[in-house]
Amino acid sequence: MADEPQSTDRAPSRRRFLKSTLAGGIAAATAGGAAAQQAVAPVATSGNPKNLPPRVPSWTQVLGDGVATHPYGKPSKFEKHVVRRDVEWLTASRESSVNFTPLHALDGIITPNGLCFERHHGGAAEINPADHRLIIHGLVDKPLIFTVGDLMRMPRTNRVHFLECAANSGMEWRGSQLNSCQFTHGMIHNVMYTGVPLKVILDEAGVKPAGKWLLAEGADSSAMTRSLPIAKAMADCLVAFKMNGEALRTEQGYPIRLVVPGWEGNLWVKWLRRIEVGDKPWYTHEETSKYTTLMGDGRARQFTFVMDAKSVVTNPSPEAPLLTKGRNVLSGLAWSGRGTIPRVDVTLDGGRNWREARIDGPVLDRSLTRFYVDFDWKGEELMIQSRAHDSTGYVQPTKDELRAVRGVNNIYHNNGIQTWLVRATGETENVEIS
């Protein structure tokens, strides 16, 4: 079994920035205003400028593709750069690896199915749903075997939830490294799941009073297994068969997967084939050798299920620099495994001044939330951060606040505040503030 993504000497290191060095170099940008827009650099265009409006462009003079040309829709060829990407050296093999959602290229709160990040422990299993079964056994009154068809005839529900890998932002524990919003925060996606409440399935089998834990097992070659408290299973977990209205993608667990709202992604077992009810956790390979956090004092944190409140500014970011002076829109995402996000604060000057961002779109329980700040940029350097507040009153901490408690000997559950330095050229860089 390959190890979880970890830092290596090949990681491009980013220098740390001190607040004292910024004293005269960064001014808070003022929202609104009518500053004239001025291009920092000419934007490259493909094609002949003579074809641009108000002249008649070539594409208005020929018939477009017919409806039968693309039986399954796909993005425009001009959006071919918006794809999942991986870091080849990050894990031991291509089968036990991860790719990342291009957060900087998206808006709203729903992740398109084809851009949802992947994390595999033994490669993606290709399963014929007609041959797949879900077994319920252990401390139950009546062991059961379900076909996919059986599950699709049971009462179903629809819920929007984020799924975040516990190692998301894990490369940043020891300092800013990967100069990329996609690579620092892209192990997350947010979709609408359709499925059967796990409680409905367990109730049909009849959980014995001694049943306190579940073992969920996947049908991939790694037989990914995790222990899950029965209380969580009964509260809000789903056995899902659709995402965003269509069948699960192969890499997302087709034909069925476990949905564990607000909890770390490795519990969301894909290609789900077996659930065993027991009286204690199993301490499997995936919850002992990995997904356990070594603290600075040598103790280990285990079963750190909940994903705490977190946020990131997606624009501007290293892949989405500022290109034009004047009117601009800052955009980002916030989320919490404990509830909703009622407020996000944003600073443009490294934390000296904070303003409340504008939240727009649905604000849902344990879902991504979109926020914006409209501002004028005059070409000054900016030091951009966001800070999420969740409905329990929890406030997203700084990275140094996290390190003071947990040390740096781990790669999991890093929800510290992210900093982007926007230079006078508009180039944006991953840095830290001490």
Image: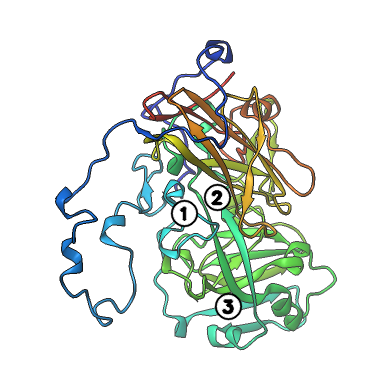
Q: CA distance from mark 1 to mark 2?
A: 8 Å
Q: Residue at x 58, y 15 (%)?
A: 19
Q: Position of residue 98 (x, y in %)?
A: 43, 50
Question: Between 427 and 123, which is closer to the camera in this rendering?
Answer: 427
- Looking at the image, tell me whether mark 1 or mark 3 is earlier in sequence order: 1
For label 2, the SS is loop
The amino acid type, in three-letter code, at marker 1 is Arg
- Residue 315 visible, this angle: no
159 displayed left or right of 97: right
Which numbered dot is residue 102? none
- Residue 332 visible, this angle: yes
Is there CB contact under 8 Å for labels 1 and 2?
yes
In the image, which is nearer the foreground, mark 3 or mark 2? 2
The amino acid type, in three-letter code, at marker 2 is Cys
Q: CA distance from mark 1 to mark 3?
A: 22 Å
For label 3, the SS is strand
Q: Position of residue 354 (x, y in %)?
A: 66, 30
Q: Position of residue 18 (x, y in %)?
A: 55, 15
Q: In this picture, is 132 found above or below 338? A: below
Disc 3 designates what residue? 134
